[in-house]
Image (tube, coloured by chain):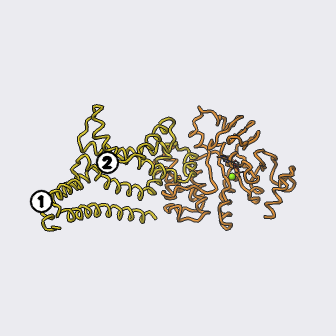
Amino acid sequence: MDFAGAYTPDNIKFLLEGFWVTIQVAFVSIILSFIIGGLVGIIRYAKVPVLSQILAMIVETVRNLPLLLIIFFTYFALPEVRIKLEIIPAAIVALTIFESAMLSEVIRSGLKSVDKGQMEAARSSGLSYVQALIHIILPQALRRMVPPIVSQFISLLKDTSLAVVISLPELTHHGQIIYGQSQKFLIPILILVALMYFVVNYSLSIVAQRLELKRT
Amino acid sequence: MIVFDQVNKYYGDFHVLKNINLTINKGEVVVVIGPSGSGKSTLLRCINRLETISEGSLSVNGLNVADKKTDINKLRRNIGMVFQHFHLYPHKTVLENIMLAPKKVLGQTDAEAKKIAQKYLEKVGIADKANSFPSQLSGGQQQRVAIARGLAMGPEIMLFDEPTSALDPEMIGEVLDVMKALAHEGMTMVVVTHEMGFAREVADRIVFMDEGKVLEEAIPAEFYANPREERARLFLSRILNH
Ligand SMILES: Nc1ncnc2c1ncn2[C@@H]1O[C@H](COP(=O)(O)OP(=O)(O)O)[C@@H](O)[C@H]1O
Ligand SMILES: [Mg+2]
């Protein structure tokens, strides 16, 4: 084990560059998944005819596939049908597909957890279904959904490392490159990589807990 | 004003409303009583189409409630509803609870809506709670907010579904007092309640329901002193000895 040799400024800089890619890819995927998953969750909650059945099928399919397979699919299979994605977009698309399906379920069950009487009170006062959704149901559901959404985001950040299989230049991948140079770097580098994931994810869950406490 | 004509309603195979014929006139206060499960809530909820009828016709203010072409949101503006469990919006203050529909549905400005909300809060006697959240209020206060919320839309009809059943006994009076005042002002009211004092004092008519049917309609004094139907007699003796 060679901590001094592993933790050179260059190596640490290289790891941080990888971590920056991890965070960027995760961040873009999070935003996209939140939008898409939110829409899918709302459409399924509202039981929009036909569309909600189709979406239910897609969501169930995606949720039952390994993320790794979806990453292979967007990077290796899509070019076969003439959709060629670069590594980073391919990773983002794969993560977004997977995470949207997961989040849509979180959001749908959050919406369903709001007491039925809330919708009835809103509708009986003359609000349209969409108005009731926006002003009454969604705000209450969102508060309840903060913890599961944050934990979904944490798992997304960790899942980004799966994109190592398509050589996404993220944290895990950069770690591999460094300890590839010498077996003596393996443990020090893995420790540092683990620490980086941990610090960011743990901070996220602390923030989630704070938000939860504030609510109650 | 509200006319049920041969109305039937089914939940799947279950026949919940059976051949309902009932007319409620403007300014009338009608109290609906009957055993649990007899269809009282369903009857009330058909009036503002929270439930749809299966057969027959139902009109409110000349509008056909069952007709798909009827603008349901327009109909509902004119009908306030108060629920057993209040259903206040927990994420909004008392004032915001009351202002929401007038702003979003009637297009009132913030200032207009606020003025009206305050007026009704005064009317139900809790002007000092305007900026509280529902969770900070007692049950009786919450139900009075719910009534103010209904009134703020300026409806011609108010529906009450067991408004005092979820309240501690000492809070029932304050809610009934608000409802009585409303009745004296000439509001058209349909009230599902077993509060006999309220019925005797302000109801124009008692409607007794059992197993989905309207079994008896009578003025309160007559109904309580001498119910015609055996089932009504049985029901009354049960709630009196309760
Ligand atoms: N959504 C529903 N689906 C099926 N059955 C229902 C539904 N709502 C009410 N019921 C049934 O209809 C009957 C009448 O209910 P309700 O109108 O709530 O009675 P009440 O208010 O007089 O207690 C009850 O037997 C109840 O179980
Ligand atoms: Mg009921």
Q: Name the kind of residue labelled 1 in the image.
A: Asp
- Same chain shared by disc 2 and disc 1: yes
Q: Does the residue labelled 2 lie within 8 Å of ligand 1?
A: no
Q: In this view, does B214 lie above or below B138?
A: above
Would residue B21 be visible to someone looking at this image?
no
Q: Which of marks 2 and 1 is in front?
A: 1
Total residue callouts: 2
Give the drawing colour for chain B.
orange
* Cα distance in 3D space between marks 2 and 1: 29 Å
Give the drawing colour for chain A.
yellow
Q: Element type at marker 2?
A: helix
Q: Which of marks 2 and 1 is nearer the N terminus?
A: 1
Within 10 Å of disc 1 (Cα), the crowding (few <14, some 14-19, many 20+) is few
* Residue under the image location 44 percent in, 57 percent down: A143
Q: Which label is found at residue A29?
A: 2
Query: Label 1 is found on which chain of the structure?
Result: A
Quadrant of the snapshot with the C terminus of chain B: bottom right
Would residue A162 be visible to someone looking at this image?
yes
Q: Element type at marker 1?
A: helix
Q: In this rendering, would B195 be left or right of B142?
A: right
Q: Where is residue B161 in the image (x, y as percent from the top left)?
A: 67, 52
